[in-house]
Image: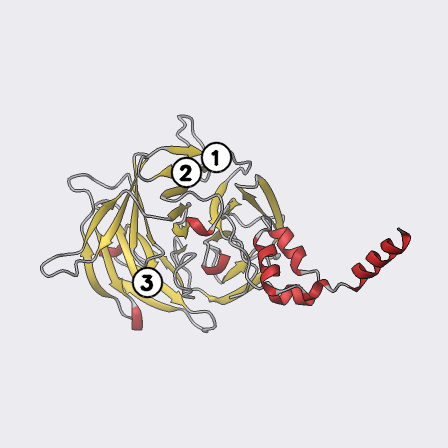
Amino acid sequence: MEMEMEAMNEGEEERDWACLPTDVLNHIAECLTEISDFVRFRAVCHAWHTTTTELPPYFPWILDSRQYPPDQNLTFYSLPLNKTYTIPAPRSLDKEYLQGPYSHGYLATLSQRTNRPISLLNPLTNHEIYFPVCPPVYNQQWIGPRQNQRGEHVVLSYGRLCSKSHTLFFCHPGHKNWHKLRLGSAYKNCRHFYLKGMLYSVKRRTGVMKVTNITNGTATLAYAVPPPFEGDSTENSEDYLVEDSLGDILRVSDRKYWFHVYRLDVGNKKGSSPCWVKVSDIGNQAIFIDVHGAFVLRAGELSGIKKNSIYHLKKPRWETPIPISYYRPKRIDIDTYKSEPFPCPLKYPSNWILPNLHHL
């Protein structure tokens, strides 16, 4: 018996775990439900690190508060795991608040003060991409692109410089200057979205949407689309535009706590005009909406995500005054309108973000 045990121990010592087949390593990595376990897995040896280059798809985390933390710690919450993560952020006096997520899990760091640089921050790795100092603007806001928009690396922000027009600033990573584009008064009081290389502007009061080509430093109106609902003001509704996994533009309208989803029909048929078509089924997809915008994920790629759903960080319907940034996670079924609230320990949940360990 002693001889057999010695032989087993010798065999275990001789086994080279670094030589496991690639498909076995990838299968093990796909079974890891927490990012911390994935990081430890890749840290075992060089072979395991280089073989498993892709981070397995995870359910989006929720960021606590869009204010840049004074204690330099960002807090995230995982709904499926019911777990809170605290990650140190780079120390800086230039950052005031966060917006996003940008492509590949990056967040935009912004400031309303003048002469402050804008940057993109990967909160998991602290990798940061800096942009030139943006000209001083009022109501500076990040408008795109969002999480899954074809990897386009473009930053846009806009501000009201005067009462008669709207000004758009945009910049590519690596460029030395911001480009300014002056828009007319028709673009005031709009919610702006940057999708598929175009500017989509939804008028808050009327719901009319303008689609504008902003390439080559000019603004050319491509077409306008009437609101999906006629004879009713949209001033008290909240609209979100998002590109789905098939390349279609979806419009999610939050009207009196009811969510309606529409697909943009650009009117390719002869004699037809662009219009919105109401849909009750978006297939194997889910829409994630937060205080800044929305993005779409395929439900089959992430465990725990239910298809044909809207995951929303929604303000609770309380009669007493509450902080405007206080949101509560909720899932809405697009077909039945049934909602499912989720418990969340965060005080001011503000953004969905897909964690990512890779750099842009």
The kind of residue on which mark 2 rests is Arg
| The residue positioned farthest toward the right in the image shown | 2
Upstream in the sequence, badge 1 or badge 2? Answer: 2
| Label 2 secondary element | strand
- Residue 104 lies, in percent from the top left, at 48, 60
- Residue 4 lies, in percent from the top left, at 86, 55
The kind of residue on which mark 1 rests is Phe
| The residue positioned farthest toward the top in the image shown | 319
Residue in the image at 57% along x and 64% along y: 53
Residue in the image at 61% along x and 57% along y: 90
For residue 196, the mark is 3
Select label 2 or label 3 by which is in front. Answer: 2
Looking at the image, residue 128 sits to the left or right of residue 199; the answer is: right
Upstream in the sequence, badge 1 or badge 3? Answer: 3
**Badge 3, how many Cα within 10 Å: few under 14, some, many 20+?**
some
Residue in the image at 48% along x and 49% along y: 302
Task: State yes or no: discs 1 and 2 in contact (Cβ < 8 Å).
Answer: yes
The relative height of residue 81 versus residue 356 in the rendered view (above or below) is above
Distance of label 1 from label 2 (alpha carbons): 8 Å
**Badge 1, how many Cα within 10 Å: few under 14, some, many 20+?**
few
Distance of label 2 from label 3 (alpha carbons): 27 Å
Residue in the image at 27% along x and 58% along y: 165
The residue where tag 2 is placed is 331
The kind of residue on which mark 3 rests is Lys
Frontmost residue, 331 versus 325: 331
Task: State yes or no: discs 2 and 3 in contact (Cβ < 8 Å).
Answer: no
| The residue positioned farthest toward the left in the image shown | 271
For residue 342, the mark is 1
Distance of label 1 from label 3 (alpha carbons): 32 Å
| Label 1 secondary element | loop
